[in-house]
Amino acid sequence: MADEFTPDERAALAPYFTNLDGPVFALVNLPEVVKGALFARYSRSPKSLRRLFLDEFLTAGVIPGGVEHEAWFPEDTEVVDVFAPPREDFLTGETPAYMKKG
């Protein structure tokens, strides 16, 4: 049985899945660590991969573009930022000027 998605869910999934209607698709625009976490969780979930991504990954901490934000973690944590489309200023591997303390 194929997943059924609302128009908003389809728009949210489209940047990351090549096909939203059929059983065959590819993941795109996601870091390998996110794919690994997604498949590790999927192996223990009754949900479809796309539904799992939507319910537990995509909406877990989405911050709209242009919104100033910060985060604090009380323990050692690996944080993964996913940008779609990819942010050119982060692809160089250097810290953007606006993020440097000066």
Image (cartoon, rainbow, N blue to C red):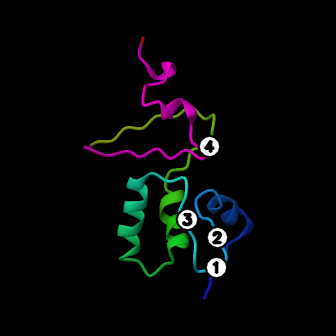
Q: Residues within 10 Å of mark 4 (few under 14, many from 20)?
A: few
Disc 1 target residue: 22
Amino acid, disc 3: Leu
Which of 21 and 25 lies nearest the eye of the viewer?
25
Is 19 one of the magenta-colored residues?
A: no
The location of residue 40, given as percent across then percent down, is 35, 68
CA distance for labels 2 and 3: 14 Å
Q: Name the element at disc 1.
A: loop
**Badge 3, how many Cα within 10 Å: few under 14, some, many 20+?**
some
Residue corresponding to mark 4: 64
- Element at label 2: loop
Q: Are marks 1 and 2 in contact (CB under 8 Å)?
A: yes
Check residue 98 for magenta coloring.
yes
Residue that extends furthest to the top in the rendered view of this protein: 102
The numbered dot on residue 19 is 2
* Circle 1: residue type: Gly
As drawn, the residue found furthest toward the left would be 76
Rounded to the nearest whole Å, what is the CA distance between mark 4 and mark 1? Answer: 29 Å
Q: Is residue 46 above or below residue 5?
A: below
Q: In this view, does 14 lie above or below 46?
A: above
Instruction: Specify few, some or many for label 2: CA neighbours under 10 Å numbering under 14, 14-19, or 20 or more.
Output: some
Percent position of residue 9, x then y: 66, 65
Kindly indicate whether the residue at mark 1 contacts the one at mark 3 (C-beta within 8 angstroms): no
